[in-house]
Image (tube, helix red, strand yellow):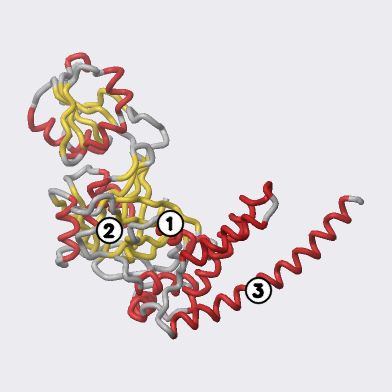
């Protein structure tokens, strides 16, 4: 036989497989309707396990694993079809529909914005990037930013969420669980750290370096090589570190911060671009008290819990996979007071203009597990 002959046989088998697959999915939908009518759970682990064992045993030894993967995938797709056919949470659908109708067509340029830190902070630079004519208010900590937005003191807030070299900003993720807000946009800001000190300071005389703990970590290689004996003191913000250096008038104290702080606080540069990687970006989210979905929104963030049972997270992720959704981030955070139980934060590429995505969100909202939709938005690079 020639290669084309083999391909023709595969094409014929694929047509048969497709016909049988469609029949099976229709039966799965019918079973889903029966289960909803009789208040039965969609997932039946005992039956699925029995089928997997039977199909694996009936397959040739060298194909047993392949057969198991095939039927696991079919089960995932069947459950997804059954889930999407159920009504879901109407409140979630209404909230998304209302947000799409009420959100302005153009992202505002002149709003009141809350950021953590002082003048010269990276959060302030991110705020200026999104709101070039915005009025910026500074707060002592990230909790203050959340509160300012919740209480209506500011229309928007800016918060760092992750760094390309040092990972997630865990404190912000932990605070997200305790506040009511929606993400309406995000921005990636390239971070260039400088070592600044008071005029006349000699690099060889520096005994203490202060900055935010993330900045200290992002510059760990430089600090280890050039200042292995220096005291490293964390503070709440990189710009605040620069301010403290200026106020101290010490010449043996330096700060890691942005170059913008040099002129703001009358400091001098001892070293530039001291971060571990040239590709050093921090992602900031812009939050608002009400859901707003601006045109072009192609990213969705949510928080969800799953039962503390084997395979529960996999079954959740399979629902995204069945819709061809690209997961951008999966972050787990422990639930306080509950041993080895976690909340999961998802970022994924999707649009709420897709009925299937809205139905998926409605289904997740209707589940007995904790579910919070953080927002549907786009990212500025």
In the picture provided, is 87 more to the left or to the right than 248? right
Q: Circle 2 — which element?
A: loop
- Camera-side residue: 72 or 252? 72
Can you identify the residue that label 1 sits on? 311
Can you identify the residue that label 3 sits on? 22
Q: Tell me the quarter of the picture where residue 113 sits.
A: bottom left
Q: Tell me the quarter of the picture where residue 91 sits.
A: bottom left
Can you identify the residue that label 2 sits on? 133
Report, in whole angstroms, how far the alpha carbon at label 3 lies from the one at label 2: 55 Å
Residue 35 shows in this picture: yes
Report, in whole angstroms, how far the alpha carbon at label 2 lies from the one at label 1: 49 Å
x and y percent of residue 315 in the render?
45, 61
x and y percent of residue 86 in the render?
45, 79
Most extreme residue toward the left is: 248
Pick whichever of labels 2 and 1 is earlier in the sequence.
Answer: 2
Report, in whole angstroms, how far the alpha carbon at label 3 lies from the one at label 1: 26 Å
Most extreme residue toward the right is: 1
In this view, the mark in front (3 or 2): 3
Mark 2 neighbour class, 10 Å CA radius: few under 14, some 14 to 19, many 20 or more: some
Give me the residue at 35% from left, 48% from top.
283
Residue 358 image label: none
């Amino acid at each position: 036989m020639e290669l084309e002959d083999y391909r023709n046989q595969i094409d014929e088998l694929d047509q048969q497989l497709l016909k049988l697959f469609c029949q099976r999915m229709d039966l799965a939908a019918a079973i889903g309707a029966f289960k909803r009518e009789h208040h039965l759970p969609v997932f039946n682990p005992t039956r699925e396990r029995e089928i997997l064992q039977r199909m694996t045993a009936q397959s040739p030894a060298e194909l047993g694993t392949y057969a198991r993967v095939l039927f696991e995938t079919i089960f995932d797709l069947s459950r997804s079809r059954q889930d999407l056919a159920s009504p879901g949470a109407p409140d979630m659908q209404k909230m998304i529909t209302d947000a799409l109708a009420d959100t302005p067509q153009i992202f505002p340029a002149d709003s009141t914005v809350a950021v953590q830190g002082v003048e010269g902070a990276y959060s302030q630079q991110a705020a200026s990037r999104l709101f070039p004519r915005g009025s910026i208010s500074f707060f002592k900590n990230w909790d203050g930013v959340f509160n300012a937005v919740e209480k209506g003191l500011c229309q928007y807030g800016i918060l760092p969420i992750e760094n390309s070299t040092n990972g997630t900003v865990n404190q912000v993720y932990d605070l997200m669980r305790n506040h009511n807000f929606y993400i309406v946009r995000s921005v990636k800001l390239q971070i260039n750290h400088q070592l600044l000190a008071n005029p006349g300071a000699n690099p060889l005389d520096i005994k203490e370096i202060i900055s935010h703990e993330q900045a200290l970590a992002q510059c760990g290689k430089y600090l280890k090589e050039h200042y292995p004996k220096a005291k490293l003191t964390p503070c709440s913000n990189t710009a605040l570190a620069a301010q403290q250096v200026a106020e101290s008038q010490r010449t043996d104290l330096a700060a890691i911060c942005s170059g913008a702080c040099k002129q703001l606080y009358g400091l001098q540069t001892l070293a530039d671009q001291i971060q571990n990687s040239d590709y050093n970006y921090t992602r900031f989210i812009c939050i608002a008290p009400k859901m707003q979905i601006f045109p072009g929104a192609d990213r969705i963030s949510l928080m969800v819990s799953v039962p503390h049972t084997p395979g529960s997270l996999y079954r959740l992720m399979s629902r995204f996979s069945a819709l061809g959704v690209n997961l951008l981030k999966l972050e787990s955070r422990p639930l306080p007071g509950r041993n080895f139980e976690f909340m999961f934060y998802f970022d994924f590429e999707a649009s709420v203009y897709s009925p299937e995505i809205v139905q998926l969100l409605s289904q997740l909202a209707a589940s007995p597990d904790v579910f919070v939709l953080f927002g549907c938005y786009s990212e500025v690079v």
